[in-house]
Image (cartoon, helix red, strand yellow):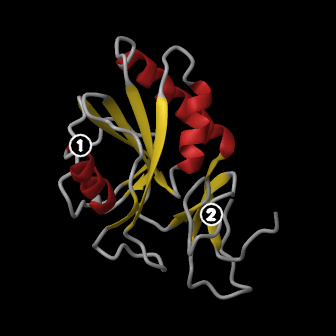
């Protein structure tokens, strides 16, 4: 993979991220060891990488998976402040324990609105788990139940995080400057 000049610094390598995901899986297994019906919902496209890695580590309980597609970023690096559900879940979650995964919690808009949408479907419980928790003042009151890694208030790409639908496949998380000029890399990794 050729290095992109807009990478400012690599923050987390694949091994660090996947170790933390394994810890999340253990927490889920312990929390839900007596549950009969568990549904893990990933917010696409960002949480796909997180969800796929997570379920590899969940071996002591059975889970169903589903996906929801919602957008609050319509190009660029700033949330639009509104949310549009593009594709809803297929699973009936009424009376079931539900875990909602997202790639990153920043403003809280996406998770808060999807949470409210899912609560209308009357799950037994609903837990929110972003892989990355950005240190930022939230625009929405949102309580998360667990998270993977706390990250700085910078624009990040890799391991599911994107810029204009690119860079999700990078096996690391990096600070990314979408406005950087070619030849001015500030990489300190």
Give whichever of 69, 109 is nearer the camera. Answer: 69
Q: Which residue: 82% across, 68% down?
A: 2
Q: Position of 73 compared to 1: left or right? A: left
Label 1 – label 2 distance at C-alpha: 41 Å
Tell me which corner region of the image, top left, top right, bottom left or bottom right, holds residue 177. Answer: bottom right
Of callouts 1 and 2, the N-terminal one: 2
In the rendered view, tell whether residue 183 sits above or below residue 52: below
Residue, far right: 2
At label 1, counting other C-alpha atoms closer than 10 Å, the crowd grade (few under 14, some 14-19, many 20 or more) is few
Residue 38 pos. (x, y %): 39, 26
Tell me which corner region of the image, top left, top right, bottom left or bottom right, holds residue 84. Answer: bottom left
In the rendered view, tell whether residue 55 sits above or below residue 168: above
Residue 64 pos. (x, y %): 47, 31
Residue 150's disc number: none
- Please give the residue where the numbered disc 2 appears in the rendered image: 9
Residue 169 pos. (x, y %): 68, 57
The quadrant of the picture occupied by the C terminus is: bottom right
Q: Which residue: 60% across, 40% down?
A: 52
The quadrant of the picture occupied by the N terminus is: bottom right
Q: Which residue: 62% across, 63% down?
A: 9
Give whichever of 81, 126 is nearer the camera. Answer: 126
Tell me which corner region of the image, top left, top right, bottom left or bottom right, holds residue 109. Answer: bottom left
Task: Tell how many labels.
Answer: 2
Residue 45 pos. (x, y %): 53, 58
Indicate the secondary structure of the residue bearing disc 2: strand
Q: Which residue: 46% across, 48% down?
A: 67
- Please give the residue where the numbered disc 1 appears in the rendered image: 121
Q: Position of 151 compared to 188: left or right? A: left
In the rendered view, tell whether residue 122 sits above or below residue 152: above
Indicate the secondary structure of the residue bearing disc 1: loop
Q: Position of 2 compared to 136: left or right? A: right
Closest to the camera, between mark 1 and mark 2, is 1
């Amino acid at each position: 993979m050729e290095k992109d000049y807009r990478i400012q610094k690599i923050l987390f390598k694949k091994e660090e991220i996947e170790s933390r995901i394994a810890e999340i899986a253990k927490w889920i297994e312990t929390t839900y060891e007596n549950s009969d019906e568990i549904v893990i919902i990933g917010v696409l496209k960002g949480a796909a990488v997180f969800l796929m890695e997570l379920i590899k580590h969940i071996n002591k309980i059975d889970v169903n998976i589903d996906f929801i597609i919602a957008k609050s970023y319509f190009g660029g690096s700033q949330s639009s402040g509104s949310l549009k559900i593009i594709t809803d879940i297929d699973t009936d979650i009424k009376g079931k324990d539900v875990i909602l995964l997202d790639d990153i919690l920043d403003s809280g808009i996406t998770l808060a609105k999807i949470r409210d949408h899912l609560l209308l479907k009357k799950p037994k419980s609903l837990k929110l788990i972003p892989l990355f928790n950005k240190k930022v003042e939230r625009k929405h009151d949102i309580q998360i139940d667990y998270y993977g890694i706390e990250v700085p208030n910078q624009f990040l790409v890799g391991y599911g995080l994107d810029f204009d639908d690119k860079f999700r496949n990078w096996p690391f998380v990096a600070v990314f400057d979408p406005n950087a000029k070619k030849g001015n890399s500030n990489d300190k990794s």
